[in-house]
Amino acid sequence: MALPVSADATPAAPVRSVSARHFVRLKLRVMGNNFRGQGWRIALFIGGALLGLWFAAGGFFLFAAPGLTGNGEYAVLVAAAGGGLLVLGWLLLPLVFFGVDETLDPARFALLPLPRRTLVTGLFVAALISVPVLAVLIASFGLVLTAWSLGGWSAGLTAVLGVLAGLLLCVAASRAVTSAFATMLRSRRVRDLAAVLLAVTAALLGPLQVFGLAALREADWARLAGVATVIGWTPLGAPWTAGIDVAQGRVWAAPVKVLITVATLGALLTWWSRSIESAMVGAASAGKAPVRRGVADGAVAQLFPRVAGWARRDQFGALVAREARYWWRDARRRANLITIAVVGIFVPVMINVTGGDFAAMGEEGFTAAASDSSPVVVTISMLFVGVLASVTLANQFGFDGSAYAANVVAGVPGRVELRARMTAFSLYVLPMLAVVGVVLSVLIGHPGWIGLTIGSLVATYGAGLAVNSLVSVLGAYSLPETSNPFAMNSGAGLTKGLLTLLAMLASAVAAVPMVVAAALLGDAWLWLALPVGVAYGLGAALLGAYLAGDVLDRRQPELLATVTPRR
Amino acid sequence: MTVEHPALALRGLAKRFDGTIAVAGVDLDVPAGSFYGLLGPNGAGKTTTLSMAVGLLRPDAGSAQVLGHDVWQDPVTAKRLLGVMPDGVRLFDRLTGAELLAYNGLLRGMDPAVVDQRAAELLDVLALGDAGRTLVVDYSAGMKKKIGLACALLHGPRLLVLDEPFEAVDPVSAALIRDILTRYAAGGGTVVFSSHVMEVVERLCSHVAILAQGVIKRVGTIDEVRGGRSLEQVFVEVVGGRTATGEELSWLSR
């Protein structure tokens, strides 16, 4: 990739040309500098690498299974389906979960006199240096083993070629798509929308997986093999199945499939190099928001959304109104609300409907149902939903970031602050919990248990609010203030996970009395659960705000410092 | 009762971050009714000092008093007298300008009717009325400074503390901000602001303090500090800037 340099160019000609080697060295250097003096980062990296190897080994044996067992019948199916999933994973996972590895951000090269070809090749080669690529390489060599054991060395060699091309395809696809997205996401509105869509996708992955598995169990294997053959002729499956084709005597198919892969690869790289250019110069407009003319209302009336319209126009009311607006307008918070809604419905349904035969027993009537242990199971599943909903507030001040300074400057009392935040969040969550309670009790065939479900939900939610308001004051951490919705704070993930786990455990413990009552009190509890649960939840939340508010009063500046992102 | 107190009195304020000293004992008296400029190069500790003075950052040592009320002992009273515009701090920017003003007003315990009237006036004067329902996050840098100033002014504070009010502001907005601040000071308010734009400080301020390496190097009325020279000369001398000798970087001229 020599740089075409004309010797008589007016600016001083570069002494040495830039090649992909420089990009590789740059990437290694940046990765190395990231580790410098950061023991925990090295630990995280090693942990990630080990996890990658673990998955790689699993994938290897899955791909190698047809070869190891000498059973070629399902070889195409395994190769096409597994390989296709790999490509799809490379396409979608960076968008949904992991974010893009922006060690080498194309925008940083904007001012350097590099031809686009050099840049794209360099970035592409640099992108190949990563743990996931190594993991996929290891895993996909299972396919080589399969092809070799089924069809000898010629099939094996073809498989090596195919697998390497497939790997390049994976990386190129992920780069091209994320780059195109990044350009599109320059505008804040599109970005917010995308974040929410991705949250929905992420929340739906669990349910989809279960349905997918269920579908697989009943699937017709012969038909699946037919589908796999078709996938094998698309770019998704072509590189992975080429070796198997040679092994099974369809030698003519291999070059065609390699050609398909190479053509796709070329198209993807061209696409990528186009979007890199616009990412570098910022071709996409900043997406000026449409100017909506102000309504004739006063400023105060504009602040209060309809859900918070009942609130008094004072300090508490202003906090509730602002929080209520933020739960809707801040994409990060809205994504959390959507997760609660999806998981809140799905998990209890899974536990109660597919998990036990209690529902079937319940069909016979109320007396029969009341005698089994189901109320305890229902209460426990409700406990999970309540805890999940409330743990969203575990880093409620982190959502605000440095904007929290406004409240510190105004000297808002801690108790008012926490009560208002709980109230605003509950405006959205309580209706959701009510829906979950009703839907679940209808689905399991016990409409009479609505009191039990809603009572348990509110009790756990309230207890969780209490625990989490304390956690949010003491264990807050900063979230990145970035324009990229896919970016994460490396390292914050671990802290966040531990903190969330702690908060969930404590909330669950605080709600245990509801489970005990469900176990001991029998029939009477079905009626008592609602009033007792609501009182318990409300009391716990108020007590939590009272105690945590006191702590907050004493450490407002410290809290502000911890949630302010470091630049 | 508050008449004899200085508007802002800092005594021995000190702060260190991870072993490096950001502010090493700052004493400062800001007389009521003055227009006070806090000057200093980047990293001198201006933002740290002002944050400690208004209750955003707990000092390691020292005290800050607003019109005789200690910011850290009696925060409620002190903060009521204070209007603050921090720098490098986000606003609640998913609100529109009007919503943000209403939020801040109610947070300060103001009467809703007064909030409505003042918010409308401020938006009008600061030429933010045209923004309509645009969220503050979509504002330009200058508009963000202006809405930040409006938030600080809304409750009619006795002391206004502004961190870099003229940073990243176009000349038109800067003139507007200057105008409003002058009017506020003429009406008996006290303004303290940090800056490193010498022209603005020279034009506006009655008093100046020069901060470098976390210590006050020069303090007094603007004429005392200048001593007949230009403020920029004094500043560069105090801060110890390097002047090029002409030998190095010779390849720049070809």
Image (cartoon, grey):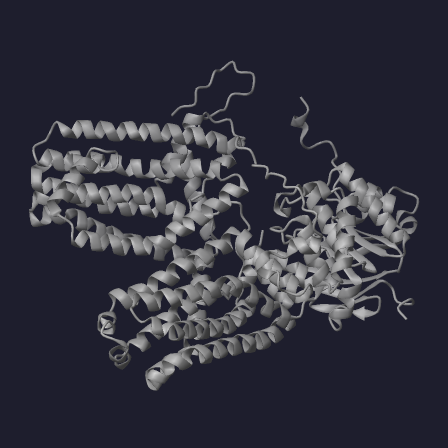
Q: Is residue A15 above or below residue B159?
A: above
- Give the total of numbered labels: 0
Residue B120 place in picture, x, y as percent: 76, 49
Q: Quadrant of residue A167?
A: top left
Indicate the position of residue B38 as horizontal and vertical percent values: 80, 52
Left of B203 or right of it: where is A39? left
- Residue B135 in view (yes/no): yes
Q: Which quarter of the figure is the N terminus of chain B placed in?
A: bottom right
Q: Position of residue A71 (x, y in %)?
A: 7, 46
- Please tell me in which quadrant of the rendered image residue A227 appears: top left
- Residue A437 position within the rendered picture, expressed as x and y whole percent measured from the top left: 39, 68
Residue A110 visible at all: no
Residue A242 sits above or below residue A46 on the image: above
Quick one: which residue is furthest to the front in this view? A365
Instruction: Give the position of the C terminus of chain B as an image quadrant.
Output: top right
- Tell me the residue at 33%/66% (across/down): A442
Q: Could you tell whether A540 is left or right of B63 in the image?
A: left
Residue located at (66% from left, 51% from top): B88
Q: Nearer the viewer, residue B144 or B242?
A: B144
Q: Nearer the viewer, residue A277 or B23?
A: A277
